Amino acid sequence: MDRLWFDRSFGELTTEQLYRIVELRARVFVVEQRCVYLDADGVDRVARHVWAESGPIDAYLRIVPAGVKFAEVSIGRVVVAPHARGTGLGKELMLRGIAAADGVPIRIGAQAHLERFYAELGFVRASENYDDDGIEHLDMRRPGG
């Protein structure tokens, strides 16, 4: 399948791109996972946005500068659209996000059931499990280099 990959700052996003990103995040995080929270948290303005599309947006993540959410750079809002799951796209997305972080340490707040997935990408547990909007999470860290 032919996919186009994008890496944009907030100011470089078109209105259409931003709408489609927010639509995917709401579809998965709010509706599918039944988490009522404010997705428009102000962090998007300082983040880099990485996504793949083949018509619709297939997968997305944001890279947040150090000092905004964690002391380290962080990757968050990692999502693969329902139509693209099971294709290996999540791993490719994360590898692109890690590469875009330019070799610095990265911290994530991962859903606990995905710990093994992130461990395979070099992340190690950095906290005990905690509840985030009714879903068990843990912090994980990937050393730079």
Image (tube, rainbow, N blue to C red):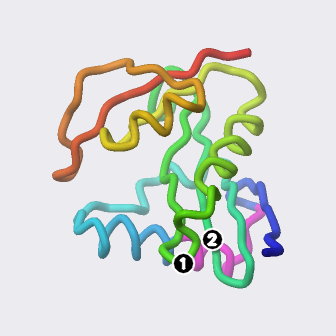
> Which residue is under mark 2?
58
Q: Measure how far apart labels 2 and 1 are at the Cα level.
A: 7 Å
Instruction: Name the disc covering residue 2, or none.
Output: none
Residue shown at the point (22%, 29%) measured from the top left: 129
Q: Is residue 82 left or right of residue 15?
A: left
Q: Nearer the viewer, residue 65 or 76?
A: 76
Local secondary structure at mark 2: strand
Residue shown at the point (58%, 71%) measured from the top left: 84
Q: Is residue 97 above or below residue 126?
A: below
Type of amino acid at the residue the image marks with label 1: His
Q: x, y percentage for residue 5?
A: 79, 62
Residue shown at the point (54%, 34%) measured from the top left: 74
For marks 2 and 1 on the same chain, the one whose residue lies earlier in the sequence: 2
Residue shown at the point (76%, 57%) measured from the top left: 8
Q: Give the magenta range.
A: 12-21
Q: x, y percentage for residue 71?
A: 49, 20
> Which residue is under mark 1?
83
Quarter containing the N terminus = bottom right
